[in-house]
Image: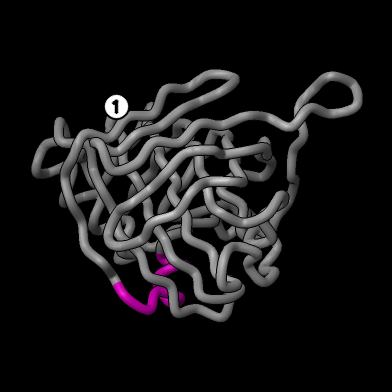
Amino acid sequence: MSWKMSGTYAGSCPCQLICPCPVDGPPTGPNGECRNLNVFHIEKGNHDGTDLSGVDFAFVGWFPRNLSAGGWKVGVVVDQSASDDQVDALETILRGQDGGPFGDFAGLYGEWLGLERAAVELTVGDRPSASVSDKARITFEPLPGPDGGVTTMKNAMYGFAPEFRIGKGPGHVDLFGIDFDGVYGETSGFTFASEMPEGAPKGRA
């Protein structure tokens, strides 16, 4: 089935600045692993006729080593205001069953931790913040560039976007038994689809 969604995301993990996961490097979090949370706000989206616009969801991951080595643990939380059809569509997409970037991810999943419904919210802006009920809260603090602008990473192998802002991601997360205090953060707009343009980033969880 065809699908497409676009919007904004913000993420955090305990890796030292700067997280090496987007370039498939070994994680620099405690115990040499990366625990992470990325929260997405879908501004526009559709899955085979099901409108996904306005839905927020959280993608929670645990990477025991560099991303391409696989063995990921992955769980998803969809905002409680989403309809049953929207939840079913997102689970199909995020489990990789209908192709796109998450279809690429699926071959690297070691364990699917499940899908839950709770209050999920992403507040967009220059310093976005995100929360998942009372279990997770993160903020994004940009790293300034020498010209006063923002620091970005571009053309990363596992980027959620062709270019994304990087910085600090303080906060605490405890979801699906994956808990951490955030150090690194990133944020950008995103566009995902069942058929991505040739050469597009694989996406990063």
Whether residue 68 is visible, yes or no, is yes
Viewed as shown, does residue 77 lie left or right of 141? left
Name above or below for residue 103 compared with residue 119: below
Residue 195 to residue 46: above or below: below
Q: Is residue 101 above or below residue 79?
A: below
Residue 90: within the magenta? no
Report the residue at 29% width, 38% height from top.
Answer: 132
Q: Is residue 12 left or right of residue 135?
A: right
Residue 72 picture quarter: bottom left
Of residues 162 and 171, the one drawn nearer to the viewer in this rendering: 171
Image position, residue 70 (x, y; %): 50, 78
Q: Quadrant of the N terminus?
A: bottom left
| Residue drawn where x is 69% and y is 41% of the image | 163
What colouring method underlies this structural image? one colour
Q: Residue at x 59, y 41 (%)?
A: 185
Residue closest to the eye, 76 or 136: 136
Up-down: is 41 above or below 117? above
- Number of on-image labels: 1
Disc 1 marks a residue whose amino acid type is Gly
Tell me which segment is drawn in magenta.
103-111
Residue 199 seen by the camera = no
Q: Which residue is mark 1?
A: 54
- Any magenta on residue 108? yes
Q: Residue at x 39, y 29 (%)?
A: 122
Residue 201: name its quadrant: bottom right
Give percent across and percent down for residue 194: 41, 54
Q: Secondary structure at mark 1?
A: loop
